[in-house]
Image: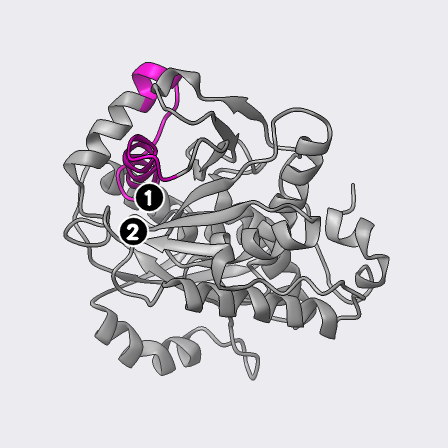
C-alpha cells in the first residue's frame, strides 16, 4: 500500500495514526474553461475517488476513521445523516468490506429521484436503518442506538455526520497536500481560492489546515448547504486547529501552521430554504456544468457550491486569481 502523504512527510505518524487506502491518487485536475468565468477556474475532481461502491469526498475521511474503529476493537460503526446521505452510504459500503456492521440514524429532508435512488442503495448496503425523522428525535434516540448496537460490552464506534471530526478531517489535509504537489508539478497554477460545499465542515477544515502545512497561500471558500449545524468560519477554523492538535499529539513535529480567521471564509447566500432543498441558481449551475464542462453535479451540495462560484466570479470577488472548484460528488 502506498503510504499517505501525511506519513511520508512526517514518518513519526506511521506507527501512531493508522490509515487504510481506499482510493487511487492523485485525483485529476483540469481547467473548467466552458463555464465562461472571468477568473481561470480549475477542477479538482474527487468524484472518482474510492474503489468501492461509492466515491467522492467521504471516502478520504473513512481512510482515517475506519482503521481507528478497528484499532478500538469495534464491531459496529454508528453514524447519522439525511435520507439521501452520501456519507452514510459510503460508510456502510466501505465498513462492510472490513467486516464491520453499520447502523444509520436518518432524518427527513425533501425527497427527489436522487434521494429515492439513494434510499434503495442504503437498503441494499446491509446497514441497519433507523428512520428517526427529526434531529430532536435522533438526539433523544442516541442512548438507545448505542445500547442496541453494542456487541457485549463493546459499544459501536460513532462516526459524526459527514465524518467531520478532527480525525476525519485529515482526509482533506491529505487532499490539500496532494493539490500542492500538483501545483509544484505545473499541472495548475497556485490558486487564490478553493471553493467547496460545506455540509458538515470536515472537508473545508481539512483543506485549510493542509494548505497551511503545504505552504500555499490558497484560501478556502466554503459554501454552506446545511442549516442544521453551526458551520461558520470560526467553527471550521476551530476544527482545523483540533486536527492540527491531533497530529501533534500523535507525534508529528509540525511547523507553526495554525490556520487563522482569513483561511476559511463561509458563504450562506446559496442555501435556499434549507438542507437538500433545491434552488433555482443551483439548478442553473447544474445545467451549465453539464453542458459547458461535462461535469455531473447534484442539487444538495455541488450545484449550490458552483452557483456561488459563478456569481462571486461575475461580481469580481476572486480578483482575477485562479480558482479551484472541488467536485465532491461520487456516484457509481
The residue located at (27%, 81%) in the rendering is: 140
Residue 182's place in the image compared with 171, above or below, is: above
First in sequence: mark 2 or mark 1?
Answer: 2
Residue 71's place in the image compared with 47, above or below, is: below
Q: Quadrant of residue 136?
A: bottom left
Residue linked to disc 1: 301
Q: Quadrant of the N terminus?
A: top right
- 301 in the magenta segment: yes
Q: Is residue 295 left or right of residue 27?
A: left
Give the image location of residue 322, x and y in percent. Answer: 50, 31
Magenta span of residues: 289-317
Give the image location of residue 83, x and y in percent. Answer: 27, 53
Mark 2, residues whose alpha carbon is within 10 Å: few (<14), some, or many (≥20)? many
Frontmost residue, 207 versus 78: 207
The label on residue 42 is: none
Give the image location of residue 330, x and y in percent. Answer: 44, 36
Amino acid at each position: 500500500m502506498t503510504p499517505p502523504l501525511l506519513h511520508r512527510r512526517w514518518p513519526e505518524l506511521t506507527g501512531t495514526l493508522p490509515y487504510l487506502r481506499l482510493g487511487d491518487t492523485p485525483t485529476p485536475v483540469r481547467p473548467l474553461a466552458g463555464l465562461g468565468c472571468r477568473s481561470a477556474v480549475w477542477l479538482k475532481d474527487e468524484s472518482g475517488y474510492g474503489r468501492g461502491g461509492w466515491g467522492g469526498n467521504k471516502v478520504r475521511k473513512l481512510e482515517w476513521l475506519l482503521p481507528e474503529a478497528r484499532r478500538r476493537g469495534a464491531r459496529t460503526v454508528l453514524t447519522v445523516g439525511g435520507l439521501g446521505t452520501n456519507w452514510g452510504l459510503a460508510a456502510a459500503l466501505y465498513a462492510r468490506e472490513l467486516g464491520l456492521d453499520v447502523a444509520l440514524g436518518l432524518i427527513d429532508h425533501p425527497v427527489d429521484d436522487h434521494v429515492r435512488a439513494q434510499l434503495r442503495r442504503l437498503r441494499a448496503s446491509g446497514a441497519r436503518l433507523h428512520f428517526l425523522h427529526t434531529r430532536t428525535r435522533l438526539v433523544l434516540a442516541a442512548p438507545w442506538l448505542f445500547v442496541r448496537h453494542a456487541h457485549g460490552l463493546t459499544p459501536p464506534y460513532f462516526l459524526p455526520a459527514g465524518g467531520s471530526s478532527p480525525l476525519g478531517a485529515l482526509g482533506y489535509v491529505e487532499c490539500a497536500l496532494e493539490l500542492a504537489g500538483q501545483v509544484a508539478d505545473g499541472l495548475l497554477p497556485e490558486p487564490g481560492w478553493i471553493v467547496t460545499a460545506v455540509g458538515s465542515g470536515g472537508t473545508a477544515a481539512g483543506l485549510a489546515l493542509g494548505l497551511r502545512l503545504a505552504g500555499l497561500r490558497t484560501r478556502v471558500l466554503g459554501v454552506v448547504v446545511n442549516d442544521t449545524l453551526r458551520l461558520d468560519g470560526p467553527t471550521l477554523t476551530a476544527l482545523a486547529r483540533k486536527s492540527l492538535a491531533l497530529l501533534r499529539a500523535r507525534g508529528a513535529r509540525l511547523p507553526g501552521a495554525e490556520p487563522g480567521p482569513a483561511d476559511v471564509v463561509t458563504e450562506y447566500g446559496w442555501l435556499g430554504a434549507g438542507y437538500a432543498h433545491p434552488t433555482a441558481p443551483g439548478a442553473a449551475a447544474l445545467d451549465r456544468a453539464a453542458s459547458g464542462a461535462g461535469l455531473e453535479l447534484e442539487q444538495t451540495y455541488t450545484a449550490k457550491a458552483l452557483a456561488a462560484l459563478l456569481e462571486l466570479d461575475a461580481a469580481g470577488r476572486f480578483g482575477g486569481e485562479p480558482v479551484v472548484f472541488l467536485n465532491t460528488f461520487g456516484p457509481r
